[in-house]
Amino acid sequence: MSGPAAALARRAPRSLRWRLLSATLAAAAIALLLAGWLLAGLFRDAVTRQFAGLLTAQLDQVVARLEVGAGGAPALDPAQLSDPRWLRPYSGLYWQVDAMGPGGQPVPALRSRSLWDADIAAPPDEPADAQVHVHEVAGPGGARLLLVERLVRLEGAAGSPWRVLVAADLRDNDAAVQRFNTGLGASLALLLGVLVAAAGAQVHVGLAPLRTLQRAVAAVRSGQAARVEGDVPAEVQPLVDDFNGVLDRNVVVVQRARTQAGNLAHAIKTPLSALLQAAEAARRHPDELAQLPALVQEQVALARRHVDWHLARARAAAAHGMPGVHTDVAPVVQGLQRVMARVHATRGLHLQVAPVPAGLRFAGEAQDLHEMLGNLFDNACQWARTQVRITLATEANTSPPRFTLIVEDDGPGIAEADRDAALARGGRLDESVPGSGLGLAIVQELAGLYGGGLSLGRAAPGLGGLRAELQLPALGT
């Protein structure tokens, strides 16, 4: 199979229309087949019971006319029976009287003229007195007959009771059942067609909102609309809301990226201009060439700090809110503790780190968590005299859950009036200590992008230095 037919076959299993229609067709076909089988059986049973009732009336007529003849043999005057078919050979209506022979075997003793020279071979049976039994037997010429029988005991009759049989041809009965089944099949087929047409109309109407949604999405893709708008069913509205949320986030990300690119371009413009002017000055005044390496190193370091700053912001902004992004806190804290212990080993600092709650996870990138914690740890170790203490607290009752990491040292601390300046980008309170002035600012910026924050204060008594509290979103404890 190839061409359009093959393409349709490939698309069909993925089509909602095809699935709904095929499921409706299968369910309707099964239901109608079962209904047809049930109705046909009920009609056949009803016709057979009615036919048996008519034959029972005929049996009562034969029994009423049955007499005891000479020698105790059964006798019946055919002229006393009202139906002329009793007298017409092979008319399809027959009666027969059997005497019960030795061993209980029936022996035909009397029969209607319609049987001519044939007998009805009734199955072995012994109904109770006055009880009627119904059988289906073979008749003259192999015709199917419905037979009713009864045992009769007459006064004056010697020996065993007589078995009276009345049978009739089932051809008319079968023809009536066949006509009914034919009409029933045609009616059910017509009903199936109507149901399929109704299902098709229902599917068409039911999927109409999806076509509207498709046009709305196409309008967004072509730039004709900024959001998916329109009247949609309540079942589809959450999808539309989520999609619009993605569009809104995409707009925010694009705007943020443009702003970041503009800020970065503006930030490195000054170092580049300074380098260009220095190079031009060195070209014009060769005696100033000795100052060029230091200036280049200074301006490149400045540009690099700005690049690192904006890359960190861009990475955190992209990771914020992304599903499935999380980082175990314990390995990061333990790894940084080992690093800081080696880096500041010559100073003999005591790093006291409280156990991290089991299962605590940061809802963000591992690199950003390293960046924030690393800056806080390094800042505390640089300013501490002998001791740095790190503790964690969780806030499970907030939405979303949060955790707070507290870093304290026994250094000089930061006066309350200078704390805002310490968090400003490039803010440095002591030029004697190496650094770029971006550490705490980067921590505050990254924490803010994740919905957290950084606050500075005075450490607990016994330490007295700086206390930095970093709040971050958590996935659970």
Image: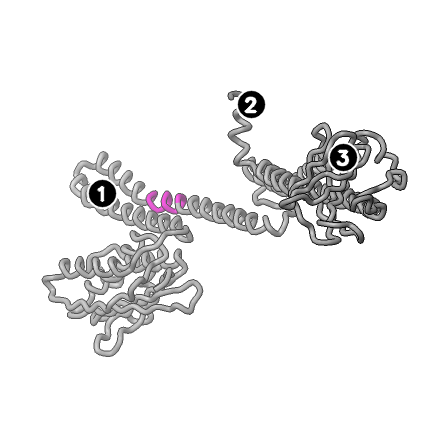
- The amino acid pointed to by label 3 is Asp
Q: Is 294 inside the magenta-drawn segment?
A: no
Residue to which mark 1 is pinned: 296
Residue to which mark 3 is pinned: 169
Q: Residues within 10 Å of mark 2 (few under 14, many from 20)?
A: few
Q: Is residue 28 left or right of residue 83?
A: left
Q: CA distance from mark 1 to mark 3?
A: 119 Å
Mark linked to residue 183:
none
Residue drawn at 31 percent across, 62 percent down: 359
Q: CA distance from mark 3 to mark 2?
A: 57 Å
User: Quarter of the image holding residue 452?
Assistant: bottom left
- The amino acid pointed to by label 1 is Val
Nearest-to-viewer mark from 3 and 2: 3
Task: Name the spot of residue 87 as percent of width and height, x first.
Answer: 85, 33
Residue at the extreme bottom of the image, as rendered: 461
- The amino acid pointed to by label 2 is Pro
Residue at the extreme front of the image, as rendered: 71
Residue to which mark 2 is pinned: 4
Task: Name the spot of residue 357 as percent of width and height, x first.
Answer: 29, 66
The front one of 365 and 134 is 134
Residue drawn at 30 percent across, 41 percent down: 272
Residue 461 showing in the rendered view: yes
The front one of 358 and 92 is 92
Chain part drawn in magenta:
261-269
Question: Which circle's residue, 1 or 2, is located before the other in the chain?
Answer: 2
Q: Residues within 10 Å of mark 3 (few under 14, many from 20)?
A: many
Q: Work out which quarter of the rendered image holds the C terminus and state it.
A: bottom left
